[in-house]
Amino acid sequence: MFLTDATSSASQLVSVSIHDGGGACIDPPSDGLVSVNWRKNMVSDVGGPPSSNDAIFIQFVQGPSIGFAGANANNTFYVGSRVPDPAVCAASYPKTLDAGAITVSGPGFAPLNITAHTQNGFTNYQSSLPTGAIAGGTYQLSGSVTSSVQLPAPIAVTTNLAPGTKVSSAITVTWTGGDAQSIVTVQFLVRRPTDTVSAFVSQQTVPATAGTVQFTGLLPGIFGSPQPYPTGKVEIIVIQEPVAGPTQPFAVPGFSMGGRHNWTYTFDYRGLTN
């Protein structure tokens, strides 16, 4: 559970125990899972060339009633305020474990050894990979966990979103690539001069194979005529993720739910205006 004003602030996440009939809660037996996240982040902004970072993030998690996130929904549309993300609270989070050293390997880079580290009460495996390492193909984990995953190639955005570009609120965002394993979410964010944390966002999620998203530039007219999007500083974020989750499962001794691979490729275009 978390509380938010839906515009500029959100509380920490907290766990709430609920027992049917109001009786004392009894924790069910602990589950165990391993989450492997492959991340690519590209940021294009005023003042320099685009920056790109490839990384891997792994967690060994143990606790009662835990589970992997469900499937992402495609062919969806959202328009409104961007709700702040809640902060994670260590006291309400399942136990995170150090399972020993792990070696990561893949096409185009030498095997990389990573070990667990603990920060702010969480034990994680996290390491940057060589720039461009996540380019699609077969990647392996060995050591305390053994698994192989087929990662899709990142899409290539073809719309001109260079910093300083003035874009239409009715913009069409296009890309090439994209496979049947992935969906693409495109967010059109506007921050007006008075905005600090909050922002207007229009968001669409489509199959990656669609190759295009069209924004109308108009707010839905419920009790009147449609109104145009607000004007201001524009940021367009394109996110490529699995079309369904959890994906590409693998067995892990001692972990009842095994492991899953996930990928998130984020292309963040800033310094635009409408």
Image (cartoon, helix red, strand yellow):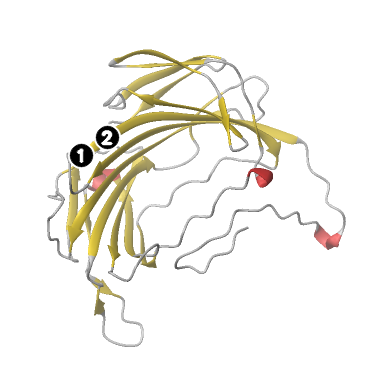
Q: Could you give the CA–CA distance between mark 1 and mark 2, rounded to whole angstroms?
A: 7 Å
Q: Which mark is residue 196?
A: none
In the rendered image, the vertical position of residue 265 relative to residue 86, given as above or below: above
User: On residue 52, which mark appears?
Assistant: 2
Residue in the picture at 77% in, 36% down:
29
Q: Residues within 10 Å of mark 2 (few under 14, many from 20)?
A: some
Q: CB atoms at circles 1 and 2 under 8 Å apart?
A: yes
Using the image, determine if residue 211 lies above or below residue 262. Answer: below
Location of residue 266 by image quarter: top left
In percent of width and height, residue 180 lies at 32, 38
Identify residue type, mark 1. Answer: Pro
Q: Residue 197 location, x and y as percent?
A: 40, 62
Where disc 2 sits, the SS reads strand
Q: Nearer the viewer, residue 241 or 7?
A: 7
Residue 194 vertical placement versus 246 (above, below): below
Question: What's under tag 2, amino acid-wise?
Answer: Ser
How many numbered dots are placed on residues in this image?
Answer: 2
Q: Which mark is residue 50?
A: 1
Whole-percent x, y for residue 43 in the image: 26, 43
